[in-house]
């Protein structure tokens, strides 16, 4: 890695670490799991640069990876539940195994491909938004910050922030409509 890449990683870590930790803490109860998720996210950031896949918009990327790690955490916890216990009776009066009620934990290649394609398109679509709209959308939707919090932080009226988000959503919906149609047809 170059010195510039190291600086980008250090800058992103210092800028985003507390917001990222707060984001994860709102979704994960166990403090040890919170630290594991945050550590995994920054580890993946370093790996991405090491593999020569630099990230254009590091902030939104970090929150997307955190969301994925949280989902993975809950999936692994679900897999830890004893799946051989009978939990209820089906229509015929037979006991049903818990494992039969849970969705498969195996990764579905098609779903994985579609998720990656969606994230790539969303990242491109976000980059195309005007800066003010992108910032509000990312802060509210991806980072989970409230409009009141954003208003205090930016000094921008809540109604203006709401309007910016609305315009961002309309533009993103228009931009991603083709991808949506593709997924619905396939």
Image (tube, rainbow, N blue to C red):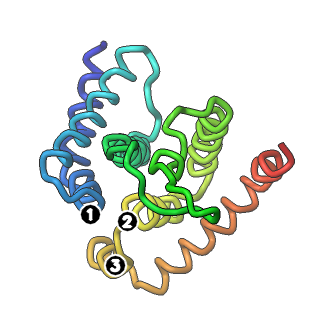
Hey, which quadrant is residue 165 in on the image? Answer: bottom right
Mark drawn on residue 144: 2
Taking depth in this image into account, of 155 and 65 the one nearest to the observer is: 65
Viewed as shown, does residue 124 lie left or right of 146? right
User: Badge 2: how crowded within 10 Å, few (<14), some, or many (20+)?
Assistant: some
Task: Give the image location of residue 145, x and y in percent.
Answer: 34, 69
Viewed as shown, does residue 130 lie left or right of 13? right
Placement of the N terminus among the 4 image quadrants: top left
- The residue tagged with tag 2: helix, strand or loop? loop
Which of disc 2 and disc 3 is earlier in sequence? 2
Which of disc 3 and disc 1 is earlier in sequence? 1
Residue 1 appears in view: yes
Task: Give the image location of residue 161, x and y in percent.
Answer: 47, 77
Q: Which residue is mark 3?
A: 151
Q: Of discs 1 and 2, which sits in the foreground?
A: 1
User: Badge 1: how crowded within 10 Å, few (<14), some, or many (20+)?
Assistant: few
Task: Give the image location of residue 119, x and y in percent.
Answer: 58, 42
Mark drawn on residue 26: 1
Say if mark 1 contacts mark 2, CB within 8 Å.
yes
User: Badge 3: how crowded within 10 Å, few (<14), some, or many (20+)?
Assistant: some
Hey, which quadrant is residue 30 in on the image? Answer: bottom left
Q: Residue drawn 83% across and 42% down?
A: 186
Task: Give the image location of residue 171, x and y in percent.
Answer: 69, 63
Which of disc 2 and disc 1 is earlier in sequence? 1
């Amino acid at each position: 890695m170059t010195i510039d890449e190291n600086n980008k990683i250090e800058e992103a870590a210092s800028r985003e670490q507390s917001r990222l930790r707060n984001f994860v803490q709102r979704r994960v109860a166990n403090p040890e799991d919170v630290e594991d998720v945050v550590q995994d996210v920054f580890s993946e950031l370093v790996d991405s640069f090491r593999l020569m896949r630099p990230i254009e918009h590091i902030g939104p990327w970090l929150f997307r990876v955190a969301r994925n790690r949280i989902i993975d955490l809950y999936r692994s916890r679900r897999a830890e539940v004893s799946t051989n216990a009978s939990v209820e009776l089906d229509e015929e009066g037979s006991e049903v195994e818990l494992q039969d009620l849970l969705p498969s934990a195996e990764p579905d290649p098609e779903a994985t491909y579609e998720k990656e394609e969606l994230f790539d398109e969303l990242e491109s679509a976000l980059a195309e938004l005007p800066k003010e709209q992108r910032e509000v959308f990312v802060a509210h939707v991806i980072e989970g910050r409230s409009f009141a919090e954003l208003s205090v932080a930016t000094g921008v009226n809540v109604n203006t922030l709401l309007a910016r988000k609305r315009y961002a959503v309309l533009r993103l919906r228009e931009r991603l409509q083709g991808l949506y149609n593709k997924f619905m047809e396939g």
